[in-house]
Image (tube, rainbow, N blue to C red):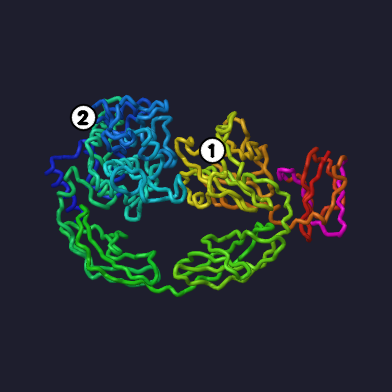
Amino acid sequence: MIKKLLSFYFLIGLTLTAFSQQAYYNDVDLSLSGIPLKDALANKIIATHTNPLSYTPGVWIASKITDANLTNANEVILIYGWENGSDSDATNDLYRDNTLQDTGDGQSFRWNREHVYSKSLANPSLTTDNPGPGTDAHNLRPADKNRNSERNNYKFGSGSGTPSGRSSDTYAGPDGANTRAWFPGDQWKGDVARIVMYMYLRYGDQCLPSGVGIGDSTLTPDNMIDLFLKWNAEDPVSETEKARNTYHSDNSIANAQGNRNPFIDNPYLATRIWGGETAQDLWGIYTSSDTEAPTTPTNVVASNQTTTALTLTWDASTDNVGVTGYNVYIDNVLTAQTANTTVSITNLTPNTSYAFAIEAKDLINNKSAKSIILNASTVKDTQAPTVPTNVVASNISGTTFKISWTASTDNTAVTGYDVFVDATFKATTTDLSYTVSGLSISTSYAVSVLAKDASDNTSAQSTAINVSTTDGASNGVTELFISEYVEGTGTNKAIEIVNHTSASISLVGYDIRRNGNGGSSWSPPFALDAGAVKNILPNEVFVIGNSSNSDQKLINEVDLIRQNNSSTNNGEPINFNGNDPMGLFKDDVLIDIVGTFNGGSGNFAKDVTLRRKAIISSPSTSFDINEWDSYAVNTTDGIGSHTARLSIEKIDNTLFKLYPNPVNGSTLNIVNPTSTKINELRILTINGKQMISIQNPSSSLNIKDLSTGIYIVKLISDQGTSIKKLIKN
């Protein structure tokens, strides 16, 4: 019955407004709402996008017309501009001579084409090589060249006033963990919102609103965020926006796309799809069809209180047409939406009082008054987490070792772990591991861990384990090398460098470079000491990532960020693909490589993550795929740590001797003065590639098949491991 009444009121409104919506939408069922309406509009704009434009000259030509100054056709309106040109700052100008388009000559006062939905923030990235998502004119607006560069690929965030550029909202982006977002200005925020909404409908998950803006999507039925709904409601449609739609829907124009942006034609369509603040209803067919709000919800009751959750119930509201849902406010902040008269509220703080209120709404977004406030509290948390288990030590050197453990559990949530060394507090971490440093060589330490929660309940300390540092002698590893090459989709790229020597290594003098498409040259160097981290501890890794990485594991583990913008050639060298070899350099000398330099454009790692095998302990300037384990694209679970078998063994080079050394013939003899049992003998190249492996070897070994060269002989016994250098002539 409700659906029939809604259709009745809708048709009356449609008739009274004399079909005020454009004929473009005549075959779209505008009585729909939510995701069905979104899908119907998406189908329409996709089907009518019949003339994809070229980036050059198509978009240039169209922009001069669609974004012309309405009082001077020889000028274009510049997005993010606001000033009439009377001050000394040309970057904030609102208008620019339309002939001063950017030609790449380096001159100021040029205008170029701003991708409002940044190319690199889409997944996969938008490209302009061929007509397609990257050349969609609805997403491209004229912008001052310098202002466009300043916006870079920063996400959008909340703000007020003129386009001051940087928002108070922060995220993990080009400038690190606390990158400030970009505010486009009150004059432009509605334009931005409606462009993002169009791109989401037109290209789906490739252009998620959450990928280009800072906001919350929990109150929408999909990935739309509240930021753009708010901007759409606050900033009315401009005449320029309307002119752009009129131009591009005209199929008789050579550089018109054929489709329209529905949210320019009627911003209320966004409200009808995603809810949020009520935007303009330029057609009048929605807000004029029903002006009566539902009754106020009553008898709000809280039950099932725990430390972090509770359940709210209330009596249903009534409406002249039909109640479609309820807004739930906590401390006067809209927190949840539901179509029911009950809702579970989670993620609350223990032993805390909250003020709850309920508001009813109908399909036209008429809202009731809020219910009488209900004050209710969560339960106090008195339960401690469980004791951490399976505490183990690894990556042991003369001055450091790594402690790992199994996660504790808690009735609310474990918030961190305290590490103790010799019963003295050492550090707090939220990870399940911690590297203890600054230790003494050949010393035993007692290590334990406890867990804690947000209410400062702490578990007992785990049973202490004893860990002994080594004597600080060399473990046979002498240099940094590349331990992982993450080739993810879009901009999800990372290079991991590992230090498996027995000492801390300064990053001064080290850099990485890209050999684009396996060509004949290296990219400019990117210094590894360019960030806050200047040294790598023994058995630790150093991760370099792209500023536009969206994979959370990569974001969490990165130590050095390469900004992704035009000045860095989109984050070079951390913008590689599977046909781009990567080199590690020390003092301008190549010491390690993934891929073959000048090897052509063959995809040696297309859609693949490469991880160095554990037996490899040294860099190599000659790429051998047998040194690497391959994983599927976007595999990032191993980033942030790397284990080499040589690095965690007890090394005792006094147990055995080899002769003759150098060896000219085919027989190698093993001198075993202590009669220690040898469990295994391995011979490896200096790059770590295993050539021979023998269990329980005799005192002499036939090595006639070994080529001339330098090798590492590794003898594993009950007393430890010996590592010897062997020269074969």
Seen from the viewer's position, the closer of residues 154 and 706 is 154
- Identify which residue, 53 or 79, lies in the foreground: 79
Q: What quarter of the picture does the N terminus occupy?
A: bottom left
Residue in front for this viewpoint, 160 or 30: 160
Q: Quadrant of the C terminus?
A: top right
Q: What's the residue at 23%, 27% (across, down)?
A: 72
State which quadrant residue 259 falls in: top left
Residue span colored magenta = 665-689
Left or right: 502 as drawn, with respect to 678: left
Up the image or down, 94 lies above or below 281; here it is above
Q: Residue furthest front?
A: 88
| Amino acid under disc 2 | Thr
Question: Which of the pair 712/152 is nearer the observer?
Answer: 152
Q: Toward which corner of the image does residue 436 lie, by quadrant? A: bottom right
Residue 484 location (% of width, % of height): 59, 46
Residue 42 visible from this viewpoint: no
- Is 504 left, or right, of 575 in this rendering? right
Residue 573: assigned label: 1
Q: Are marks 1 and 2 in contact (CB under 8 Å)?
A: no
Q: Position of residue 581 (x, y in %)?
A: 59, 36
Upstream in the sequence, badge 1 or badge 2?
2
In front: label 1 or label 2:
2
Q: Position of residue 271 (x, y in %)?
A: 25, 49
Label 2 Cα neighbours within 10 Å, binned few <14 / some 14-19 / many ≥20: few
Number of dots carrying numbers? 2
Is label 2 in a helix, a strand or a loop?
loop
Res. 71 mark: 2
